[in-house]
Amino acid sequence: MNSTGGRRREAAGPKGRRAHRPPRDQDRDVQLSKALSYALRHGALKLGLPMRADGFVPLDALLQLPQFRSFSAEDVQRVVDTNVKQRFALQPGDPSTGPLIRANQGHSLQVPELELEPLETPQALPLMLVHGTFRQHWPSILLKGLSCRGRTHIHLAPGLPGDPGVISGMRPNCEVAVFINGPLALADGIPFFRSANGVILTPGNADGVLPPKYFKEALQLRPTRKTLSLAGNEKTEHQRDPTHGSRGRGMTQQ
């Protein structure tokens, strides 16, 4: 009986729920997703992949690399289809190249013809523009602004994690949300774009920075929600009523 019970508990998992897919397969998918992110966003040239101006590379060439040889085209298709943040795109290609794959955003490589939708008027911008970060980075961000940090764009989301339509642009475990005054930045000549998976992107100013003058407010998300002072004075922080949080203010002010 003990061995049967043990097998049942093992099949159900540590919390008594059956896994939709064996953990080993889940681990392989995570490994593949991370390898795709590096190759398609950052390492294509170093890895010798022929990347087109729109960011696509031949899938067959990718799968010939040592780190991908244990994966199949079907594995890649599954990861692309099931990635909740829609990080990647596949297209059939032509007979000379076969299927093509790219990352939709997040590049440190220059991708001059990446399919980005320009957001050229205040009306084209989402009502809310938010950058998610961690508390340890907030003092530096408050002082210096948001930086591309080696990538081609600063990533923004059109809402907070869990909001309808927010699938990417912010880590779900981020601790601080910085609300951006998009129309003000746009009026100062800072461009904004929307990627194929809904992430709002900006290269910032000439130095690759979105300065603090464009911060409308900042909200600590966890462990409790409270407004953070934009003056850099922690003593002025105060608890906010969750029913009157920054989410509503961010949507009405922009």
Image (cartoon, rainbow, N blue to C red):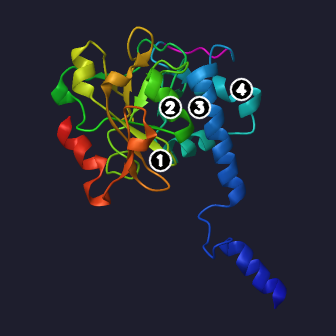
**Left or right: where 67 falls relative to 104:** right
Does 99 appear above or below 136?
above
| Disc assigned to residue 37 | 3
| Disc assigned to residue 6 | none
Mark 2 or 3: in front is: 2
Q: Are marks 4 and 2 in contact (CB under 8 Å)?
A: no
Q: Magenta region's main secondary structure? A: loop
Which percent across, then down, holds residue 69?
Answer: 74, 33
Pointer 2 residue: 139
Which percent across, then down, holds residue 245?
Answer: 29, 52
Callout 3: SS: helix
- The amino acid type of the residue labelled 1 equals Val
Q: Are marks 3 and 4 in contact (CB under 8 Å)?
A: no
Is 2 part of what is drawn in magenta? no
Which residue sits at x=39%, y=53%? 162
Q: Residues within 10 Å of mark 2 (few under 14, many from 20)?
A: few
**Left or right: where 136 falls relative to 207:** right
Pointer 1 residue: 84
Q: Alpha carbon of mark 4 to alpha carbon of mark 2: how far?
A: 44 Å
- The amino acid type of the residue labelled 2 equals Pro
